[in-house]
Amino acid sequence: MNNSIRQYRIAHNLTQEELATALGVTRQTILAIEKGKYDPSLELAFKISRYFGVLVDEIFLYDK
């Protein structure tokens, strides 16, 4: 799954640590998601999209 979390995070002037704290996860989780090494749970994907005020499919792109 591809994602644009890094772009949203940078556009909102957030560090990985700040975003992680806001979402209740570790910085390593944010890093792994950004690098495409970890697919977040559905709950976390919705938390991320709500945090940035966009739809889930604006951040995450499923490519099989």
Image (cartoon, rainbow, N blue to C red):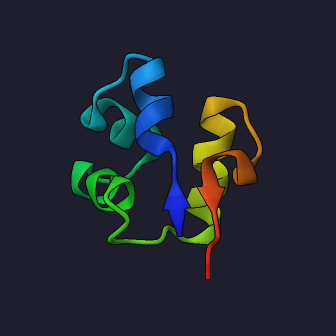
Q: Is residue 42 above or below residue 22?
A: below
Image spot of residue 7 (x, y percent): 45, 33
Q: Which residue is pictured at 22% across the width and 56% down the height? A: 28
Residue 15 image-quadrant placement: top left
The residue lying toward the viewer, choosing from 24 and 8, is 8
Q: Which residue is pictured at 28% across the width and 37% down the height? A: 16
Q: Residue lying at the far right in this picture: please name it.
A: 55
Q: Which residue is pictured at 67% across the width and 54% down the height? A: 46
Image spot of residue 58 (x, y percent): 70, 45
In the shown orientation, is residue 6 left or right of residue 1?
left
In the shown orientation, is residue 32 left or right of residue 49?
left
The residue lying toward the viewer, choosing from 54 and 42, is 54
Image spot of residue 36 (x, y percent): 38, 65
In the shown orientation, is residue 48 left or right of residue 33?
right
Q: Which residue is pictured at 73% across the width and 36% down the height? A: 54
In the shown orientation, is residue 18 left or right of residue 48?
left
The residue lying toward the viewer, choosing from 61 and 19, is 61
Q: Is residue 45 above or below residue 41?
A: above
Residue 50 image-quadrant placement: top right
Q: Residue lying at the far front in this picture: please name it.
A: 64
Quarter of the figure with the C terminus: bottom right
The residue lying toward the viewer, choosing from 39 and 62, is 62
